Image (cartoon, grey):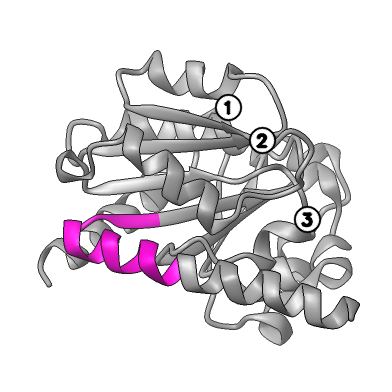
Amino acid sequence: MKVELVTNVLDANTAIAEQNRQFFAAKGVFVLNLMSAPGAGKTTILEKTIEALKDQIRIGVIEGDICTTRDAERIAALGIPAVQINTDGACHLDANMILRSLQNLSLEDLDLLVIENVGNLVCPAEFDLGEHYKAMVISVTEGNDKPTKYPLMFKESQAILVNKLDLLPYTDFSLEVLKQDLETLNPQAQVFPISARTGEGVGAWSQWLVELASSIKSK
């Protein structure tokens, strides 16, 4: 009975995610699901990305957190439409939460919608939101064991952002070891070494997003 219940929950989520996907396609909006552990730097990366791109493409953000509106307030302060979803304890966003939040966004006015998921290394990758791509942030301060301990997050992501590169000399983290693990888990993933604090690597990451958003508009 428990297996059947879980299956029903995931099936229902998948059905709603497909509705979201069709809706995004109809509006010509590229949607990115941004995931990471707590403290990896998703929001700061998002701020730097917005600063790099807001004069090139139109961006909107859905912020997912267990509580508070702090991250949405940070994004809104940059002049970007932002919606906060508080999960009240749930460790991830789901497709229905995204569907309900869309009434607070004008997708006609967007080229790129970034969904910043709840900080968690397990659940977010299991729930399709209707996004086009998933991106995973790992900070060098987390160590090299995360891809093998939490493989699904890395397998499901089209992009891996290695953040806090400025702290690399003070850690035992190895970019080469990460790339070796990804060769096994997800060899197609794009890897972006980045420092949200200094801005290193933000340009390459941002232009990758521009190209993806442009490809959706051209269809």
In which quarter of the view is residue 144 placed? Answer: bottom right
| Residue drawn at (40%, 28%) of the image | 82
Q: Main secondary structure of the magenta part?
A: helix
Return the residue at label 1.
Answer: 197
Q: Is residue 29 above or below residue 37?
A: below
Which region shows up in magenta?
Answer: 17-31
First in sequence: mark 2 vs mark 3: 3
Q: CA distance from mark 2 to mark 1?
A: 8 Å
How far is the residue under mark 2 from the one under mark 3? 23 Å
Asked whether residue 123 is in view, the answer is yes
* In contact (CB < 8 Å): disc 2 and disc 3: no
Q: Which residue is mark 2?
A: 166
**Looking at the image, do the residues carrying marks 2 and 1 touch, with CB atoms under 8 Å apart?**
yes
Point 52% across, 54% down: residue: 96
What residue is pinned by disc 3? 121
The first of marks 3 and 1 along the sequence is: 3
Residue drawn at point x = 53 percent, y = 81 percent: 188
70 relative to 193, above or below: above
Expressed as whole percent of the image width and height from the top left, the position of residue 200 reads 50, 39
> Which residue, as the protein is rendered here, is positioned at the far bottom?
184
Left or right of residue 8: residue 177:
right
